[in-house]
């Protein structure tokens, strides 16, 4: 249940996204904190209870990768690090997610120089921990797009 709650924090689109202005700065701070808390919980589960993640791995990876592309600097960086944790903890179980994750990380490398270090490190962790053929295919396919 904790996993689903953490994933829903990452997945959810904020109901008040249409709100703006100075009055809502504290609201956005709370949104960022909730997203970071959800990412921390998912990272912890990957490291200590990976079997819990495996049944919903695809959905969780989609949720996390969707956060990378939102470019909220601190949250985006945390999601990139979380993906690295997934690869380090789940190793070959992440083979099925390599194509999607590699595509997102390579896009980050192309478009967001401020995340270059985190994205490069996560790609390195990916290459070290998944099936070599799967990593090579994903990188080549994603690099061509």
Image (spheres, rainbow, N blue to C red):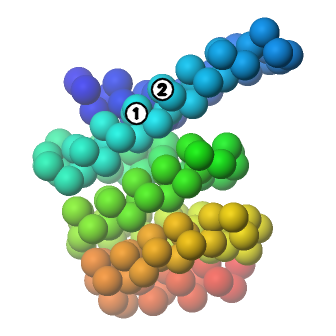
Q: Position of residue 109 (x, y in %)?
A: 66, 73
Q: Secondary structure at mark 2?
A: helix
Residue where numbered disc 1 is placed: 38
Identify which residue, 110 or 12, lies in the foreground: 110
Q: Position of residue 64 (x, y in %)?
A: 48, 47
Quarter of the image with the C terminus is bottom right
Q: Residue at x 40, y 54 (%)?
A: 82
Residue where numbered disc 2 is placed: 34
Q: Residue at x 31, y 37 (%)?
A: 41
Q: Residue at x 65, y 15 (%)?
A: 27
Q: Few, some or many C-alpha atoms within 10 Å of disc 1 (few <14, some 14-19, many ≥20)?
A: many
Q: Secondary structure at mark 1?
A: helix
Q: Is residue 53 visible?
A: no
Identify which residue, 74 or 17, lies in the foreground: 74
Q: Give the vertical position of 117 relative to 1 (above or below).
A: below
Q: Give the vertical position of 94 relative to 31 (above or below).
A: below
Q: Position of residue 110 (x, y in %)?
A: 73, 74
Q: Please state if 55 lies on the left or on the right of 111 as rendered.
A: left
* Mark 2 and mark 1: Cα distance apart in space: 6 Å
Q: Please state if 42 lies on the left or on the right of 45 as rendered.
A: right
Q: Residue at x 43, y 28 (%)?
A: 8
Q: Few, some or many C-alpha atoms within 10 Å of disc 2 (few <14, some 14-19, many ≥20)?
A: some
Q: Position of residue 12 (x, y in %)?
A: 54, 27
Q: Give the vertical position of 129 relative to 45 (above or below).
A: below
Q: Give the vertical position of 83 relative to 117 (above or below).
A: above
User: Contact, CB < 8 Å: mark 2 with mark 1?
Assistant: yes
């Amino acid at each position: 249940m904790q996993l689903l709650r953490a994933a829903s924090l990452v997945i959810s689109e904020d109901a008040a996204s249409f709100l703006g202005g100075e009055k809502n700065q504290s609201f956005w701070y709370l949104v960022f904190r909730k997203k970071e808390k959800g990412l921390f919980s998912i990272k912890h589960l990957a490291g200590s209870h990976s079997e819990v993640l495996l049944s919903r791995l695809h959905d969780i990876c989609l949720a996390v990768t969707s956060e990378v592309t939102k470019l909220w600097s601190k949250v985006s960086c945390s999601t990139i690090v979380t993906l690295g944790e997934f690869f380090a903890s789940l190793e070959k179980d992440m083979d099925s997610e390599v194509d999607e994750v590699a595509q997102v990380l390579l896009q980050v490398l192309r478009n967001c120089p401020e995340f270059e270090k985190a994205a490069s490190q996560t790609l390195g962790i990916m290459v070290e921990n998944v099936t070599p053929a799967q990593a090579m295919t994903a990188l080549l396919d994603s690099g061509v797009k």
